Image (spheres, rainbow, N blue to C red):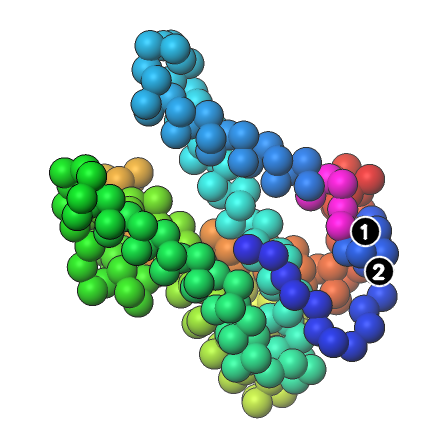
Amino acid sequence: GSSCETSRSVKPRAGLSPRGHAFGLDVLRAAAVSCVLLAHGALFYTDAFHGARYPLIVAGTLGVEIFFALSGFLVGRQLLLVAAGEASAWRFVQRRWWRTLPNYFLFLAINAALVAWVVTRQGPDARFLVFAQALAWPATSAFFPESWSLAVEEWFYGLAALAFAWAAARRASPRAVMAGLGLLLIAGPLARLVAQELAAIPMDAGVRKISLLRLDALAFGVAAAWLERHAAARFAALARPVVA
């Protein structure tokens, strides 16, 4: 995902061009895209990649995690405006939906058509309409399996918008907002560990793709956006190797 600036003027951030782009972030995005494409290619062309197949799959997993963090950082700037009472949570959610839902439902329909007329594969079910294909259970459906990552994003931003709107209503301080993010960053890995131990769910095919167990993946990016907004000097020191 990418952020939408509010209608008010926004000063260029440290390390960013006047248009809000950072060369380092673009490099990270390009690296993530390359990793994911190579990983998916390795699944289809095993002979061509041979011994490099599994390292490429690991790289693809890393690429997805980079996407989550970048999305959390870019859109997290808007969430922080919601937490500060400077933007509407409903407006934030509307913008997210307009940017993601049309394309999602388009490809949902394309995949359904392929299953109906071209390929023999498990068909869709109603869970895909509300991003519940892996909400609190493993992503076991063979239909449109790539959609799990967007489901994680949509649930995170919907729940985060509610939480940050509540923080604004309670006039929560920036430190309280960061404390909440910190708790999520701790709770996420612990919840996945418990789920894996108690339910014996495989990590890659199961736990890694369950939406409610992956909310911390984007929270890392939002935490970075918090540093950019409320601890600019520290953020600039940490980000210098990336955005320079």
Give the camera-side residue of 109 and 85.
Answer: 109
Callouts 1 and 2 close, C-beta under 8 Å: yes
- Residue 155's x, y, as percent? 40, 65
Which residue matches tag 1?
Answer: 16
Q: Could you tell me which residue is drawn at 84 percent across and 60 percent down?
A: 12
From this view, report whether residue 164 is shown above or below residue 101. below
- Taking the image as shown, residue 94 lies to the left or right of residue 74, namely left
Q: Secondary structure at mark 2?
A: loop
Image quadrant occupied by the C terminus? top right
Quadrant of the image occupied by residue 212: bottom left
Report the magenta stretch's main SS: helix
Q: CA distance from mark 1 to mark 2?
A: 6 Å
Q: Which residue is mark 2?
A: 12
| Side of 243 where 40 appears, left or right | left
Q: Position of residue 215 (x, y in %)?
A: 43, 58
Residue 22 lies in magenta, yes or no?
Answer: yes
At label 1, counting other C-alpha atoms closer than 10 Å, the crowd grade (few under 14, some 14-19, many 20 or more) is: some
Start-end of magenta stretch: 21-25
In the displayed structure image, the side of residue 98 where residue 203 appears, left or right? left
User: Extreme front residue here?
Assistant: 117
Image: 227 above or below 68: below
Q: Position of residue 221 (x, y in %)?
A: 59, 54
